[in-house]
């Protein structure tokens, strides 16, 4: 199994809502990542978890809150988002931070 | 500061032709150079990758050429097919091993 799954595929939320994005992998990878991708742009790194510990936070606003409940799961909790946060949110995983990253299909988020 | 510069931004190639995408970098600490292919609405998929100890790597119709002294690398797609139409991102990772730096992307269209 070489797949990273993400749910939901699409999400529309208001600026006062609280929602969560979920990511799962069963490849035994110990590093997991959240990226944000705007249209026609490359992915931008948001967070890195290594062995279930947050190792990198790329100065992301606190309205984005990551969580790694176990080595297979990664969540991104969203609260009080802005319309400019609308984007494709990608999860990735790798065997370790020095190995190839494999991306999930993403969650298309629209903030109204 | 864009650490990996990718060109061209868009490329149109006839079916059966060769598609060439170029990337250049400045950071000599980069030691791993992957290419990702992304179809609309999907996450990036790892296509092929190279380390600076080799000058060329070939996998099927895809070849990476690497010029360490010039700090440049390129992706060649031989016998380009309409199914290759996608956005291609080059990337680089430094020897600290944590973060991928992406190029700006190239939108490839292969005409039948």
Image (tube, rainbow, N blue to C red):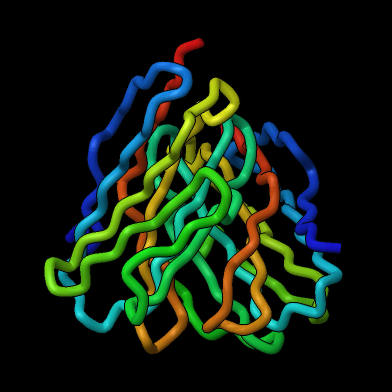
Side of A54 where A37 appears, left or right:
left
Which corner quadrant of the image does residue A15 belong to?
A: top right
Residue A59 visible, this orientation = no
Side of B50 where B12 appears, left or right:
left
Which of the pair B53/A5 is nearer the observer?
A: B53
* Quadrant of image for the N terminus of chain B: bottom left
Residue B17 visible, this orientation = yes
Residue drawn at x 45%, y 55% is B35
Which of the pair B45/B104 is nearer the observer?
A: B45
Residue drawn at x 15%, y 69% is B26
Residue drawn at x 31%, y 42% is B21
Give the x, y percent position of residue A68: 73, 76
Give the x, y percent position of residue B68: 21, 73
Which of the pair B1/A82 is nearer the observer?
A: B1
Residue drawn at x 73%, y 53% is A21
Side of A9 where B40 appears, left or right:
left
Q: Is residue B61 above or below residue B73?
A: above
Side of B24 where B89 appears, left or right:
right
Q: Is residue B38 above or below residue B80?
A: below
| Number of numbered markers | 0
Which corner quadrant of the image does residue A103 belong to?
A: bottom right
Q: Is residue A23 above or below residue A48?
A: above
Give the x, y percent position of residue B12: 34, 20
Give the x, y percent position of residue A88: 57, 41
């Amino acid at each position: 199994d070489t797949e990273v799954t993400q749910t939901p595929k699409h999400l529309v939320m208001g600026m006062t809502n609280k929602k969560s994005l979920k990511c799962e992998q069963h490849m035994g990878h110990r590093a997991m990542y959240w990226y944000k991708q705007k249209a026609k742009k490359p992915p931008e790194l948001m967070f890195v978890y290594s062995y279930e510990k947050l190792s990198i936070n790329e100065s992301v606003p606190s309205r984005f809150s990551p969580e790694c409940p176990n080595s297979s799961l990664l969540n991104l909790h969203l609260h009080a988002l802005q319309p400019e946060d609308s984007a494709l949110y990608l999860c990735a995983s790798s065997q370790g931070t020095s190995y190839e990253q494999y991306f999930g299909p993403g969650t298309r988020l629209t903030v109204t | 500061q864009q650490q990996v510069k990718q060109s061209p931004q868009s490329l149109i190639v006839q079916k059966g032709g060769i598609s060439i995408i170029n990337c250049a970098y400045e950071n000599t600490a980069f030691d791993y150079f992957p290419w990702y292919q992304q179809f609309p609405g999907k996450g990036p998929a790892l296509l092929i990758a190279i380390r600076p100890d080799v000058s060329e790597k070939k996998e099927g119709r895809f070849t990476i050429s690497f010029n360490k002294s010039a700090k440049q690398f390129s992706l060649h797609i031989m016998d380009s097919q309409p199914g290759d139409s996608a956005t291609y991102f080059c990337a680089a990772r430094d020897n600290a091993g944590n973060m991928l730096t992406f190029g700006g992307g190239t939108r490839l269209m292969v005409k039948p």
